[in-house]
Image (cartoon, rainbow, N blue to C red):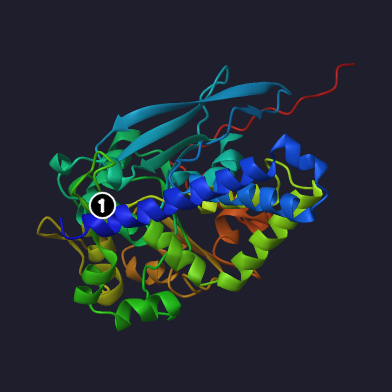
Amino acid sequence: MRYMMSYDLMETVRNANQWLGATALSMASYPANAALPNPMLSWMAAWGQVTERSFERMVTKPDWGIPATTLPDGKDHLVEVDTIVEKPFGDLIHFRVTDRAEQPRKVLVVAPMSGHYATLLRSMVKSLIENCEVYVTDWHNARDIPVSAGKFDVEDYTLYLVEFMRELGPDTHVVAVCQPAPLTLAATAYLAEIDPKAQPSSLTLIGGPVDPGATPTDVTDFGRRVTMGQLEQTMIQRVGFKYKGVGRKVYPGLLQLASFMSMNMDRHSKAFSEQIMRVCRGEATDHDAHNRFYDEYLAVMDMPAEFYLSTVERVFKQREIAQNAFTVQGHKIDIGKITDVAVKTVEGSKDDISAPGQCIAALDLCTGLPDSKKASHVEPGAGHYGIFAGRSWRNNIRPLVIDFMDANARQPVRKQPKKTAAK
C-alpha cells in the first residue's frame, strides 16, 4: 500500500488535466460565445483541445494503423494482426497480408520494453511488410497484468525471446531495436548452446547498449551514478486500484514520460505552444506532424519493477553482457558459442542514447563467429530514432539490412520475376 497513493495521485493529476482541457474546449466553444469577438476564447479552445488530447493519449494504447499495403501487383492488400504465441507479459504477433503468397523472408522484430508500446516501430514494420513476413514482440502494459502472473525480469525476457525464436524456426531473421539488443544477443547464444537447430539465420542489432561503458552518455552516467536503493525508492510504485495489476510493483509510464520530456523540455514546450497557435488559426489537423508524433510519444506503459531494476543493475552497472558473464536460471551464457548466425550492428553517429561503440561491441563478443559473418554500419547524421523510424532507416539502413538477410539466409530468397511488356 505504501506506493499506491503515489501511483493514484499521478493518475488523478493526469485525469484532472484531461478534464480541464475538455472543460476549456467546451466552454470556449459554446455557440453563444461566438458573438463575442475575443481572441482569448479562440486561444482557450485551442489550449483545451491540445491539452485534452495530450493527457488522454497517456493511457491509451496506440493502434498499429496499418490497414492495408500496396504490393508490386498494384493492388491494396489488407493487413491483419494475428497472435501466434500468447503469454502474460507479451505476445508474438504476425502481420498477415491477405491474398498474398507467404514470403520466404521471415523477420522477427524485437521491440523494446522501455516505456513505449511496440507501435513505436510502426514505420519499420510498414517498410518490412512489403516483401517480408513480419513478426513482432508485443509487450503488455504491466499495470494490466495481475500479480498472480508472477515476476518478469531480464532472465524472463530472454527466455521469452528464446521461445519466440523456437516458434518461428531457423530460417528467421531477427532485428532487435535499442534496449533488447543485448538480451537478444544473449538469447541467441543460449539457443546456440541448448538448441543449435533453432538458431535464427541472422541477427541485426540496432542502436542497443550491448556495452554501455564503451561510449558513456547521459543515460549510462545516470545508471552508474544512482544506487539501486535510490532507484527503488524514487522510481518504483505499486499499481493503484483502477487497473487489473493492482499491487504490482512497476516503474510507472507517467513517471517515465516525465523523465523523457525533462531531457528536452524547451523543445517540447515550443512544440506544444506552436501547436496551440496552429489550432487557433485553423491550420492543425487530426493527423498533422505534431499529432502523429505526440500521439505515439505520449502513449506510455508501466514497466515491471523487476525488469527495470535488473536491467539497470545487470546490463548497465555490472555490464554482464559486455563481460560475457550473463546467466539465465543459473546457466552461464557464452556469447562465443554463436558460430553460425550472421550478426550485423547498426548505429547512428549522433545517437545520444546508445552512442556509437555501444552496439558494435557485440561483434567483439562473438569470438566464435568468422569475420565473414560480421558486419556493421554507422549512419552519418542519424540520431537514436532516425536509425529505425526516420529517413535514414527508409533510404539507407533498410536496404542494407535486407541485403544482409538475403546474403545469410539459410534458404535462398526466391526473387520475384520481373514483368515484361506484352508485345
Residue at (47, 65) in percent of width and height: 260
> Crowding near pointer 1: few (<14 within 10 Å), some, many (20+)?
many
Q: Position of residue 330 (x, y in %)?
A: 9, 59
Question: What x and y, as percent, mark residue 196?
Answer: 25, 46
Compared across the picture, whether 391 is left or right of 325 comes to: right
Amino acid type at circle 1 is Thr
Quadrant (top left, top right, bottom left, bottom right) of the N terminus: bottom left
At horizontal 76% and vertical 53% (from top left) the residue drawn is 278
Q: Position of residue 133 (x, y in %)?
A: 50, 33
Q: Position of residue 319 (x, y in %)?
A: 27, 74
Quarter placement of the C terminus = top right
Q: Secondary structure at mark 1?
A: helix
Q: Is residue 111 above or below residue 361?
A: above
Hey, which residue is sitting farthest right in the picture? Answer: 423
Q: Taking 194 as reference, is 364 left or right?
A: right
Image height check: is 222 above or below 178? below
Whether residue 53 is visible, yes or no, is: no
Residue wearing tag 1: 158
